């Protein structure tokens, strides 16, 4: 039985297969409409979510399966003091696979030790978010036709942004990826990612604080929200929240074939005036997320 807690648990070949499968689902959706008939997905969301939870649920429905679960900790027995371990033991009696989001880093990993069914990490605190990474990779592949040979700028909250951490890990496996980390000093990528991923894999990267300065170099710009819920004090959040705001004017110096990604939700960091720019891909990501989750659910359930 296999879970997905960290994107690096998948080999590059497996990631490429999931992307190919998602592309096949997009091309032939009817072929997949009965693949999970009789199977149940539980979505256990101890933290807010729109896209991740609903795309998991839509994915299971489109595979012919069913869904149960909760969308806030307050409506589960966790509000009575139940441990994650006991919740998981319980839910794994009722479901065939579990997608779980939790504010504590490592909670989905702990869940795998108590579960009788596969666990998918749908975001654990400021740590990882592997299924967003699959979404991002599918989007990049569909836009650029490749997952190698490009320069990507990650901009915003690189400290708490779990989607950034997972995507850096995945991209470190592909050829000739250059990474530019654009953030205020306080929101830089954690040291462990620099040491264990970027340095170990010899990835060419640099850290800057100005987006304008690097814009002309970028093939992909990955914008992120400042993660309000991870801050210890509000004053710091207020000071940092509008560090970067992408506007049409800022894109004057960008490449014509730039791809602008954002895992969403967006707050202020991308002006709505950018949405109509053909380089904006963040609503494509939303749709791609459903297809790649369909591919992942099938893989972890062993459905061919
Ligand atoms: C992200 C998350 O939850 O980490 N959202 C998502 O899953 N698409 C990004 C964020 O909340 O800023």
Image (cartoon, rainbow, N blue to C red):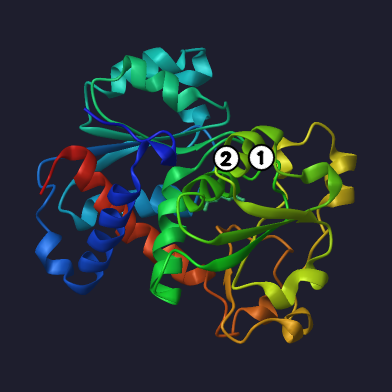
Q: From the image, which quarter does the N terminus lie in?
A: top left
| Relative to 53, 281 lies left or right | right
**At 44% from the left edge and 44% from the top edge, which residue is drawn?**
130
Judge by depth and name the residue closer to the eye, 298 or 60: 298
Identify the residue at the far front of this view.
202
Q: What element carries label 2?
A: helix
Q: Does the residue labelled 1 lie within 8 Å of ligand 1?
A: no
Disc 1 target residue = 194
Quadrant housing residue 220: bottom right
| Relative to 7, 98 lies left or right | left
Q: In this view, does 167 lie above or below 77?
A: below
Q: Is residue 265 visible from the viewing direction of this image?
A: yes
Disc 2 target residue = 197
Q: How crowded is mark 2: few (under 14 residues within 10 Å), some or many (20 or more)?
A: some
Q: Distance between the residues labelled 2 and 1?
A: 6 Å
Judge by depth and name the residue closer to the eye, 276 or 209: 209
Q: In this view, does 91 lie above or below 41?
A: above
Q: Is residue 180 above or below residue 227?
A: below
Give residue 144's mark: none
Quadrant housing residue 253: bottom right
Q: Position of residue 298 (x, y in %)?
A: 20, 47
Q: Is residue 66 visible from the viewing direction of this image?
A: no
């Amino acid at each position: 039985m296999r879970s997905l807690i960290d994107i690096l648990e998948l080999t590059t070949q497996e990631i490429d297969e999931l992307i190919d499968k998602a592309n096949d689902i997009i091309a032939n959706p009817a072929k997949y409409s009965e693949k999970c008939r009789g199977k149940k997905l539980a979505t256990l969301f101890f933290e807010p979510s729109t896209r991740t939870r609903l795309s998991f649920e839509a994915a299971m429905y489109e595979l012919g399966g069913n869904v149960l679960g909760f969308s806030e900790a307050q409506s589960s027995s966790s509000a009575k003091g139940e441990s994650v371990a006991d919740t998981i033991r319980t839910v794994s009696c009722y479901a065939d696979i579990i997608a779980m989001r939790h504010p504590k880093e490592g909670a989905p990993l702990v869940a795998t030790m108590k579960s009788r069914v596969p666990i998918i990490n749908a975001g654990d605190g400021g740590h990882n978010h592997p299924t967003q990474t699959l979404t991002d990779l599918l989007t990049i592949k569909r836009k650029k036709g490749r997952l190698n040979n490009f320069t990507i700028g990650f901009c915003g909250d690189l400290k708490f942004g779990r989607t950034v951490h997972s995507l850096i890990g995945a991209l470190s496996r592909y050829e000739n990826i250059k990474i530019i980390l654009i953030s205020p000093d306080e929101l830089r990528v954690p040291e462990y990612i620099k040491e264990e991923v970027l340095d170990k894999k010899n990835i060419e990267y640099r850290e800057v604080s100005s987006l304008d300065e690097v814009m002309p170099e970028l093939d992909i710009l990955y914008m992120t929200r400042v993660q309000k819920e991870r801050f210890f004090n509000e004053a710091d959040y207020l000071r940092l929240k509008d560090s970067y705001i992408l506007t049409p004017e800022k894109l004057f110096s960008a490449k014509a074939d730039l791809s602008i990604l954002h895992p969403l939700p967006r707050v202020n960091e991308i002006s709505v005036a950018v949405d109509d720019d053909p380089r904006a891909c963040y609503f494509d990501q939303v749709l791609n997320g459903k297809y790649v989750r369909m591919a992942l659910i099938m893989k972890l359930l062993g459905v061919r």
